[in-house]
Image (spheres, grey):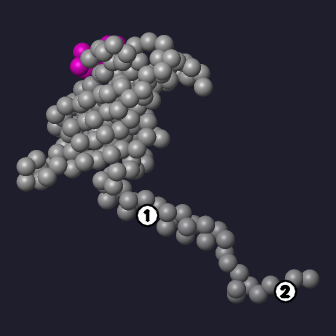
């Protein structure tokens, strides 16, 4: 027989609720700090919904007039800035199924946040000196395109009304494989 003292037992349901509440408070604190530590912060919310809407529009050819399209040898870029709502959208996609691509993207904008379909890639943030370039940032991240696995695009959404330029570099180009 086990002797149990009801005054020393832990209410596990209350304990679990307290842990969940503490975790949520910590996530809010981290989100308020911003993503200036060189690591992408996973923030689910209004940016994720806006990114999904922009992805639907970029996938529909009837909205192509809203985008600036740049075609390169192995990839294309589709981008647009919505100054009314304050968003810059960038899509990078593959022109063929022949190559797996690893791309490096540098965006020069007035924001330090990015919502992306590339959840496993880091975001590197460089803030320019305030006295010379107030509010300017260089955001560097990566995009992996694997056409035979069904991944032919990478999408990025930045909350900003100012976009200076974007550079895309091919880091690695290999024959496409299903691995």
Q: Look at mark 2 in the image and give the residue it sits on.
A: 3
Give the mark toward the camera: 1 or 2: 1
Magenta-drawn stretch, dominant element (helix, strand or loop): helix
Looking at marks 1 and 2 on the same chain, the residue that comes earlier in the sequence is marked by 2
Q: Classify 10 Å Cα crowding around label 1: few (below 14), some (14-19), many (20 and above).
A: few
SS category of the residue bearing label 1:
helix
Name the one closer to the observer, 72 or 158. 72
Q: Classify 10 Å Cα crowding around label 2: few (below 14), some (14-19), many (20 and above).
A: few
Q: Is residue 7 magenta?
A: no
As measured in the structure, the alpha-carbon distance from the residue carrying label 1 to the one carrying label 2 is 38 Å
Q: Tell me if I can see residue 143 in this picture.
A: yes
Counting from the top left corner in percent of width and height, residue 55 is at 38, 27
Counting from the top left corner in percent of width and height, residue 25 is at 43, 64
Q: Look at mark 1 in the image and give the residue it sits on.
A: 26
Counting from the top left corner in percent of width and height, residue 126 is at 25, 48
Q: Is residue 23 above or below residue 34?
A: below
Q: Is residue 32 above or below residue 5?
A: above
Q: Is residue 66 magenta?
A: yes
């Amino acid at each position: 027989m086990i002797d149990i003292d009801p005054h020393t037992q832990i209410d596990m349901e209350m304990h679990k609720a307290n842990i969940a509440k503490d975790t949520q408070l910590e996530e809010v604190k981290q989100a308020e700090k911003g993503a200036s530590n060189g690591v992408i912060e996973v923030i689910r919310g209004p940016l994720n919904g806006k990114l999904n809407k922009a992805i639907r529009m970029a996938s529909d050819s009837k909205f192509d007039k809203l985008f600036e399209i740049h075609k390169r040898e192995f990839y294309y870029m589709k981008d647009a800035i919505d100054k009314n709502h304050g968003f810059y959208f960038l899509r990078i996609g593959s022109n063929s199924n022949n190559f797996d691509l690893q791309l490096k993207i540098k965006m020069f904008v007035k924001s330090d946040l990015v919502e992306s379909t590339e959840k496993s890639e880091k975001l590197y943030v460089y803030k320019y000196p305030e006295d010379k370039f107030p509010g300017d940032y260089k955001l560097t991240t990566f995009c992996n395109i694997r056409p035979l696995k069904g991944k032919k695009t990478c999408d990025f959404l930045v909350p900003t009304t100012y976009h200076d330029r974007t550079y895309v570099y091919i880091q690695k180009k290999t024959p496409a494989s299903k691995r």
